[in-house]
Image (spheres, rainbow, N blue to C red):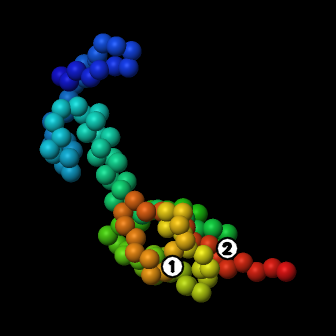
Amino acid sequence: MVRVPSSHGGSREFESLPAHHFPSQASIPGNCFQAKHIFQRDKVMEEIEVRLFATLQEGRFKKTKIRADEVRTVGDILDHFKIDPEEVAIVFVNRKHASLDTEIRAGDTVSLFPKVGGG
């Protein structure tokens, strides 16, 4: 059992799971709730979120995730999803302007915008 302080004073007891239930967090002792939260956060951080806008979504997706170890640059994302670089006019990585050569890491969000025409 693990005793966890509560926000209104006092504390509550919770049954704890052994550390082997959380393989990537084997060194975390005790509280299964804390270990589960950290394990899920690390799992999310191993991914890159890719967002497509306007005509780039046609026949594709609006938002998806890709494993971080599958790509190294924004250009690799275009290759992975078979998007012609000529279709892309604006690239953002974590809300900052970027290029196709920009290196990306786990936890990043890549947003791709198409060329827009009009008159």
The amino acid type found where label 1 is placed reads Ser
Q: Please give the residue where the numbered disc 1 appears in the rendered image.
A: 99
SS at badge 2: helix
Which residue is disc 2 drawn over? 55
* Residue 110 appears in the picture as rendered: no
- Is disc 1 surrounded by few (<14), some (14 to 19) or many (20+) residues within 10 Å? some
Asked if labels 2 and 1 touch by Cβ distance under 8 angstroms, the answer is: no
In the image, farthest residue toward the top: 10
Q: What is the three-letter code of the residue carrying label 2?
A: Thr
Residue at image position (37%, 67%) is 105
Task: Tell me which corner region of the image, top left, top right, bottom left or bottom right, holds residue 36.
Answer: top left
Q: What x and y, as percent, mark residue 60?
A: 57, 70
User: Residue reaching furthest front?
Assistant: 96
The picture places residue 23, in percent across and down from the top left corner, at 19, 49
Towards the viewer: 67 or 100: 100
Q: Secondary structure at mark 1?
A: loop
Indicate which disc, 1 or 2, sits on the residue closer to the N terminus: 2
For residue 93, above or below residue 33:
below
The C terminus - image quarter: bottom right
User: Residue 19 in the image: x percent, y percent?
Assistant: 16, 40
